[in-house]
Amino acid sequence: MAVVIGFIPDEYGEAALTAGLEEARRRQTGVVVVNSTKGDALIDKRYVGAEGMSTLEQRLEESGVEHELRQTMGRDIADEILSVASQVDADAIVIGIRHRTPVGKLIMGSVAQKVIIDATCPVVAVKP
Amino acid sequence: MAVVIGFIPDEYGEAALTAGLEEARRRQTGVVVVNSTKGDALIDKRYVGAEGMSTLEQRLEESGVEHELRQTMGRDIADEILSVASQVDADAIVIGIRHRTPVGKLIMGSVAQKVIIDATCPVVAVKP
């Protein structure tokens, strides 16, 4: 049992990380932070590099929450989050999602939508 | 501060109610249960009748969680949930959503999608 956090190195990932750590504290459990890339781009900004991983690891250490960091390449990001959630029998999945822009249409990112619909555990959607 | 629960008298509402009460316990706060109808149908199954309200009130009493029950008519259901969440400065909103059917498309209900995108607090999506 753990809280699974979908992490990308931007404001959405930050929001998910912060909320996920709080969620884990409330549930008195640990977190599994998932960072993936489909690997279909030479440079994927959503993928955390070596330096970023070190910073992330340090933040997780400082949080005092039991944690694990999983980085994978080549799979669909939503599938990866769902797969990890299933493996660890997740209490909840936390993901960061976009606000609607003031003049924006009602569109949810495909990763978020897939995770929310296909997860068998509660999914917490948070915003930066 | 409170956990706002979107409630309709079916398995999705039940899932939201159960998860919402747990969420409130973990957050050591109360719940505001919102049940609304647009009022555009003579009989709206999502609207809780007098008997249902009494049962719901009793369940909330038994939960021991501080609670409030708001029933409104004539407004968009998502707007109503978001409006209550804003009024009470919600810690989180809990809604029940559909699983994807085995051969189903990736479609999220419009109420769920609107609440998740437009909420300014975390939204917890749970399944029956």
Image (tube, coloured by chain):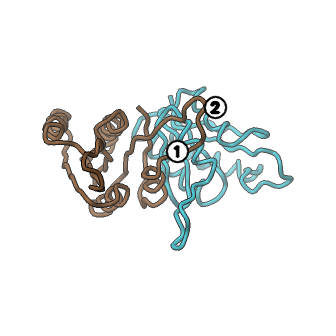
Chain colours: A brown, B cyan
Of residues B113 and B50, the one nearer the viewer is: B113
Residue at left 58%, top 41%? B115
Mark 2 lies on a secondary structure that is helix
Do the dots labelled 2 and 1 sit on one chain? yes
Task: Report crowding for label 2: few under 14, some 14 to 19, many 20 or more residues within 10 A (C-alpha).
Answer: few
Q: Secondary structure at mark 1?
A: strand
Task: Give the residue pinned by disc 2.
Answer: B83
- Residue depicted at x 19% and y 46%: A67
The answer for which chain carries disc 2 is B
Judge the density around disc 1: few (<14), some (14-19), many (≥20) Cα neighbours within 10 Å. many
Report x, y in % for residue B12.
58, 57
Give the chain letter at badge 1.
B
**Up/down of A117 relative to A51, above or below:** below
Question: At which x and y percent is residue B3?
Answer: 51, 37
Identity of the residue furthest to the right in this view: B42
* Residue placed under numbered mark 1 in the picture: B94
Q: Nearer the viewer, residue B80 or B13?
A: B80
Q: Marks 2 and 1, how far apart in space?
A: 14 Å
Residue appearing at x 29%, y 59% in the figure = A84
Q: Amino acid at mark 2?
A: Ser
In-front residue for pair A105/A16:
A105
Tell which residue pokes out farthest to the front in this image.
A42
User: Which image quadrant for residue A26?
Assistant: top left
* Residue B47 location (% of width, % of height): 74, 50
